[in-house]
Image (cartoon, grey):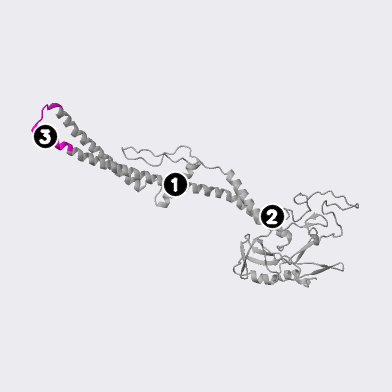
Amino acid sequence: MAAQLVLSVTEDDIICPNSMQNIFVVSTPSATNAAAYSRVTEILLTDQRHPVTGYLSPVGITSRGVIRGVATDFDDAALNRMLIQPRNSSLLGARRIKSTETVILIFNGLKVPNYVYCGQVIYRCTLYKRQIDTCRTRGQVGHRQDVCPTPSTKVCDHCGHLPTDNPHVCNQQGCALCGEAHRTGDRECRHRYQLPYLMRRRRQRRRRRKQAQQQTPTPATSPVPAKTTEPQGPPLGPRNPTPTDQLNWADKVACKGEAHSAQRQGHSPQQPDPELAQLKRMYAEQAKEIQSLKEKLAKQQAPESREGSIISGPVSTRGAKKRAGPTLQAEEQSEFDRLTANIYAILEQYHAETTAEYSAFNAKLEGMQKQFIELAAWPAQMDARTKVLEEDLARSKRAGLIPRP
């Protein structure tokens, strides 16, 4: 054989010819055999030698990148020694495109770094876009001109028909890739490069995420309640409103959020807040004191009004009591004002705390809504990922990259 391997070590190898691209693929479980096949430079068919070029195809899930401007003094072996290093942890190998300064890099996984190190020099790395194989000899898409299976059959570059008359009347049909008025696969063609798999997968994920967001119903958020004046009376009632018979989606999420927050604070959602209970008790005590002061003022004002209607002239013995009355009334009024100010301060503090709690709860609800949307889109993403992996596995098996059991 051309690879100089004995028959006993090639029993598990598989050779698959590809007539469209005029190539053949060899699948082998042995790394030694693969290296021997890659060194083959010519094969013998029907007593005629044909030059060939072999290369190793990476196994598993890999991606390709491109660096440009690498000096042509280094061969592929030197490039691999300089590129495969700890700073390029995911790099598997490198090969130069013919004699150009462009080098193709193979990375493990589906991520191509932005920069790579070649020795001590850093290079910008971009996604590798493979050019669609076109043959100007046959005017077909699928193989290159240098590996055309029928190089003697020459067709017109513009119309794709075999010239039968002389001179040939050409009816230009345009490019087979984009339809514009130039030759198929010309440098001016904008569609002569294949879209990399990473870009296709990124666009598919973006499209599915957008469809999931459009299909997911947007939950209605409750408006912020307006600030109302708290009544000066009995203690405040329970903060939570009475639940209705039918709850919408936002109310259910709100109830779950309150239950989780209460569990994190160390008490169940049915138990009252200790700070709120203390404020209620203070409010009740202040209300009782105000009510008692009102009753005292009413009792003191009633005798003075009756006394003023009965006595017609000034009485010297009652003068001191008349002067003492306004003093006592002023003290009680100041005490009443102080208690009222304390109550208003307590109410303002309670309103500020309630507003802060509501803002925190509203922010938490929005976060839960975002998580819900992400979770709703997660099954579709996993299904798409599984489908892509299955297609890659089937494609690898068909290409012979994975050995048969």
- Viewer-nearest of discs 3 and 1: 3
Residue neighbourhood size for the residue with mark 3, other residues' Cα within 10 Å, grouped as few (<14), some (14–19), many (≥20): few
The picture places residue 165, in percent across and down from the top left corner, at: 91, 51
Circle 3: residue type? Gly
Say if mark 1 contacts mark 2, CB within 8 Å: no
> Which stretch is magenta?
309-326
Circle 1: residue type? Phe
- Viewer-nearest of discs 3 and 2: 3
CA gap, disc 3 and disc 1: 64 Å
Residue 296 found in image quarter: top left
Q: Give the side of residue 296 with respect to residue 267, left or right.
A: left
Q: Give the side of residue 8 with respect to residue 292, left or right.
A: right
Considering the whole magenta stretch, tell me its main secondary structure: helix
Mark 2 lies on residue: 195
Give yes or no for residue 72 being in the magenta stretch. no
Mark 3 lies on residue: 319
The picture places residue 267, in percent across and down from the top left corner, at: 39, 50
Q: Which mark is residue 361?
A: 1
